[in-house]
Image: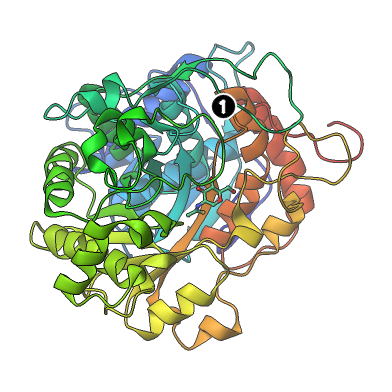
Amino acid sequence: MPLPRSAEFRGGRGFALDERTALWAAPGTEGVAHWLRSVLGAVYALPLAPGPAGGGPQACGVRLLLDDALAPEAHRLSADPVTGVEIRGGGPAGVFWGAQTLRQLLGPDAFRRAPVRPAAAVVPAVRIEDAPRFRWRGLLLDVARHFMPKDGVLRVVDLMAAHKLNVLHLHLTDDQGWRIEVRRHPRLTEVGAWRPRTKLGHRASPLWDERPHGGFYTQDDLREIVAYAAARHVTVVPEIDIPGHSQAAIAAYPELGNADVVDTAALGVWDTWGVSPHVLAPTERVVRFYEEVLEEVLEIFPSPFVHMGGDECPKEEWRASATAQARIRELGAGDEDGLQAWFTAHFARWLAGRGRRMAGWDEVLDGGRPLPAGTVVSSWRGYEGGVAAARAGHEVVVCPEQHVYLDHRQAAGDGEPVPLGFVRTVEDVHGFEPVPAELDAHRDRVLGVQANLWTEVVEDARRADYQLFPRLAAFAEVAWSTGRQDFPARLRAHLPRLGALGVEYRPPAGPHP
Ligand code: TNX
């Protein structure tokens, strides 16, 4: 899981790893070797020592090799009772995804942390050839609505990597919280990371209501997350949402808001779900402030992409504000949408000047100003934005809310702890086709797909498990695989792996496995 392009099981004896099995890592694949030792070492008491000095790869039972003939993420894995296991990848990422496949081949115990006894690490005789369908196989984690402590994020990275997902879109700022330390503007977290209470606004335990909530990542925390993810071939794309979804920032620095129409000094971090009407003022001063924020963001995140949000920006304040109206005239922006487009274009150019590409929600297409080349559009309001963006020559990440919003409920009826939105079962997610007919002519522009976990009602890592799984396994197949056959049987075989990882997945209908 996800299904490989081809897998040929040969039956008969497999290859048994034991304490004498050596691991050969070609230059460039040492990180994969380190990862394999760290996951298999303790469980099976396997040292997987580097081969005997001068012995060469042939002397080793597990061999990690690079092969120029393959694409960077493509790989071939073969296991043979005599010659052992060989993983060849086009690049280290390909070898790493092959190593993830190897762990699945070993069986559920390979997903445990603690030793198993008796320990039998046997790889069935097999030949696998594999490569991903999409380059961007993403998961959005909203750490703004509910903060997830660093260890929880690292665990999500591991769970993503186990499913060959490779982009973690971290939604770091919103009306309800600011989660990234900015040294130049400390109040963003001193004030913006804390809310006195949370009105859950759904039928949940009354204990959750009115509870204070908060937290933020220091820059060192984020560097650790980035490095941990990089070692697992996962890119962390930070999101700083502008010009809407910004009330936490305005609560910290009232001058960021439209002070000529509301008393921004009286605003706190928002304690309600939904979209706050309080948005950034469209002034040079605010632009400069966010450039200063982004300067620090770029130092922390080496990602080629920086997401600038752009979704759901209410325009009432700008309509009422003399300052905003003057800006519209001064810039020749036409109207409020044009003003937002000016914001967006400014940061897209600013990022491009620093060698990065801006990503934005599909609202960044509104406002009649062409987006700078290289902008990536996250198509969330159906496919429409994706089609328009692709037509305009932009690359698209397909993530329609009807299909891949994992905050939405997984079944009808009263049984769901998070009874939000559309019903999206694991089968629905598995059946999702990211390139429908209307996008087909532009399939080259589809950079990839993304599932989004918004966390208004996902208050901790265990609830996140329930919302993510098993649907994220189905989504991974959408993102990685070209075929999807026999999913129910493979999902049944996959659940014990999740169980061994300690994932509190939603049990599928029917008898519990
Ligand atoms: C819409 S998707 C949002 C989020 C909410 C989500 C809830 C998008 C760009 N904006 O702010 O959390 O719906 O499902």
Q: Would residue 20 be seen by someone viewing this image from the given angle?
A: no
Most distant residue in the right direction: 511
Decide: is 349 above or below 163. Answer: below
Q: Nearer the viewer, residue 9 or 462?
A: 462
Decide: is 333 above or below 470. Answer: below
Decide: is 197 above or below 162. Answer: above
Location of residue 137 (image quadrant): bottom left
Horizontal and vertical percent for residue 160?
48, 41
Q: Which residue is mark 1?
A: 111
Q: Residue at x 40, y 45 (%)?
A: 278
Numbered circles on residues, count: 1
Q: Nearer the viewer, residue 209 or 129?
A: 209
23 sits left or right of 113 in the view: left
Q: Residue at x 57, y 21 (%)?
A: 112
Horizontal and vertical percent for residue 273?
57, 38
> Callout 1: few (<14), some (14-19), or many (20+) C-alpha neighbours within 10 Å?
many
Location of residue 13 (image quadrant): top right
Horizontal and vertical percent for residue 244?
38, 51
Q: Quadrant of the C terminus?
A: top right
Horizontal and vertical percent for residue 502?
62, 22
264 sits left or right of 484 in the view: left
Q: Nearer the viewer, residue 250 or 35?
A: 250
449 sits left or right of 11 in the view: left
Q: Amino acid at mark 1?
A: Phe
238 sits left or right of 136 in the view: left
Most distant residue in the left direction: 353
Q: Secondary structure at mark 1?
A: helix
